[in-house]
């Protein structure tokens, strides 16, 4: 008799477990379907990068199972006192996210906002790119700087960021130093004591943006220290969204996502990447910061990108080995299409410093726009050549003539940096 009771208890337990599993599956199906429908009208204001950048610089990945790069930018408040929502805004945070489909890894690389770039021949900090030309300019700046293709972007505004953190229930952070900073122009009033603190949306924004106190004290390495804090915060957020209880917060999370993020992903892509981020193990996630040296140029402080120091980091942003350019085997010709005497020779010297062979040089017809022509080469070389040569205009042609692999014409728009 007692054995029968035990058997009935076992059977009941199995039935209970089955019902719970079935219920969770049903909830996930309903949530996934609702998520897709809810997000279908999500990106009405998104910038179509594939139509904005030249020669398919941005290749959107429409099918699942492929690797990709996503540029995530957080925009600041814009001009103090402005009530115009379209007022040009700098990026306060810039993170390049790579999803490696072959080994299911996610690599995140933060880009210091003071990183030196050139736009229209002028030195700029990379956080100004968005203010100058919007998302298109920000994406182009990052792609030109490090030589990888960017497939998607996600632009986060801080008001929406607050709502998103509130929607997941906030996060707990151990604050290791006192923070006291006030800036009325940015509506920032940051005050934290050391110890474990629960951050709601507003407090999370303050922690995420802090890098120094009003009296000038703070992080010894400035923005780089702030990025370290951001990585700690991101890890805590990912820990929170992996909690089983997050399923009950999905409705409020969806509402917050729509108000917080502008992106060129469609609903299915948002679902796919959202699931990947929520399910990835800690051993499959890495967070790095782009390396560079601080340098003052005409009284302005910049972080100058160092290609050699970033080789390993950049390699993690591409699992397409065909993108590697064998510099020592390329036969290059440089044509000077300007009135600047010796420019082609200077450019050849610059290429040697970059690891390429010395180029043959000649003077050609005057031209306004610089151009690279690659003969019988793979388009996987494109981003690397654009970065090294500082020229966006590139064309791939087939030819029976094997004299040169790459022919560069330098026009009046050329920006030689070395």
Image (tube, rainbow, N blue to C red):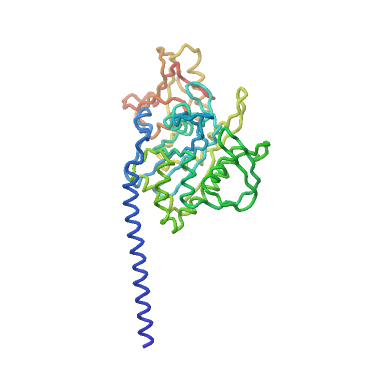
Task: Pinpoint residue 212: horizontal percent, then vertical percent.
Answer: 63, 38
For the point 53% across and 26% down, the residue is 124
Residue 378 visible at all: no
* Front-most of residues 388 and 330: 388
Q: Is residue 328 above or below residue 11?
A: above
Is residue 31 toward the left or the right of residue 330 in the image? left
Q: Is residue 320 above or below residue 390?
A: below
Task: Pinpoint residue 99: horizontal percent, then vertical percent.
Answer: 42, 45
Residue 78 visible at all: yes
Is residue 240 toward the left or the right of residue 322 in the image? right
For the point 65% across and 50% down, the residue is 194
Which quadrant of the structure image shows residue 80?
Answer: top right
Task: Pinpoint residue 88: horizontal percent, then vertical percent.
Answer: 47, 28
Task: Pinpoint residue 146: horizontal percent, then vertical percent.
Answer: 48, 34
* Front-most of residues 173 and 138: 173
Quadrant of the rendering where the C terminus is positioned = top right
Which quadrant of the structure image shows residue 214?
Answer: top right
For the point 36% across and 88% down, the residue is 1
* Front-most of residues 187 and 198: 187
For the point 46% across and 22% down, the residue is 359
Number of numbered discs on residues: 0
Q: Is residue 349 above or below residue 167?
A: above
Q: Is residue 188 above or below residue 284?
A: above
């Amino acid at each position: 008799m007692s054995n029968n009771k035990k058997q009935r208890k076992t059977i009941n337990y199995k039935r209970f477990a089955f019902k719970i599993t079935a219920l969770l599956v049903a909830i996930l199906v309903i949530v996934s379907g609702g998520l897709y429908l809810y997000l279908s009208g999500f990106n009405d204001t998104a910038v179509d990068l594939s139509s904005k950048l030249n020669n398919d610089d941005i290749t959107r990945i429409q099918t699942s199972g492929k690797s990709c790069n996503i540029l995530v930018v957080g925009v600041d408040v814009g001009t103090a006192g402005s009530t115009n929502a379209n007022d040009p805004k700098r990026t306060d945070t810039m993170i390049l996210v790579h999803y490696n489909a072959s080994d299911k890894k996610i690599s995140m690389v933060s880009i210091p906002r003071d990183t030196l770039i050139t736009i229209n021949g002028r030195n700029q900090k990379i956080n100004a790119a968005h203010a100058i030309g919007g998302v298109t300019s920000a994406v182009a700046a990052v792609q030109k700087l490090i030589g990888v293709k960017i497939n998607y972007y996600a632009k986060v505004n801080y008001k929406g960021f607050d709502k998103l953190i509130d929607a997941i229930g906030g996060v707990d952070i151990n604050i290791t130093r006192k923070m006291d900073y006030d800036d009325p122009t940015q509506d920032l009033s940051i005050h934290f004591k050391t110890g474990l603190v629960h951050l709601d949306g507003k407090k999370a924004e303050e922690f995420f943006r802090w890098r120094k106190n009003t009296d000038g004290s703070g992080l010894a390495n400035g923005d780089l220290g702030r990025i370290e804090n951001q990585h700690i915060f991101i890890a805590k957020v990912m820990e929170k969204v992996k909690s089983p209880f997050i399923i009950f917060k999905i409705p409020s999370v969806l509402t917050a996502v729509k108000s917080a993020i502008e992106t060129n992903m469609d609903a299915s892509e948002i679902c796919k990447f959202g699931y990947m981020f929520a399910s990835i193990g800690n051993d499959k996630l890495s967070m790095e910061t782009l390396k560079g040296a601080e340098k003052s140029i005409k009284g302005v402080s910049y972080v100058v990108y160092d290609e050699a120091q970033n080789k390993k980091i950049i390699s993690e942003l591409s699992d397409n080995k065909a993108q590697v350019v064998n510099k020592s085997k390329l036969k290059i010709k440089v044509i000077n299409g300007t009135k600047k005497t010796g420019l082609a020779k200077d450019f050849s010297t610059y290429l040697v410093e970059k690891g390429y062979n010395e180029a043959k040089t000649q003077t050609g017809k005057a031209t306004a726009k610089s151009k690279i022509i690659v003969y019988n080469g793979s388009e996987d070389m494109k981003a690397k050549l654009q970065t090294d040569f500082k020229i966006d205009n590139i064309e791939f042609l087939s030819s029976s003539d094997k004299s040169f692999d790459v022919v560069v014409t330098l026009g009046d728009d050329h920006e030689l940096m070395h």
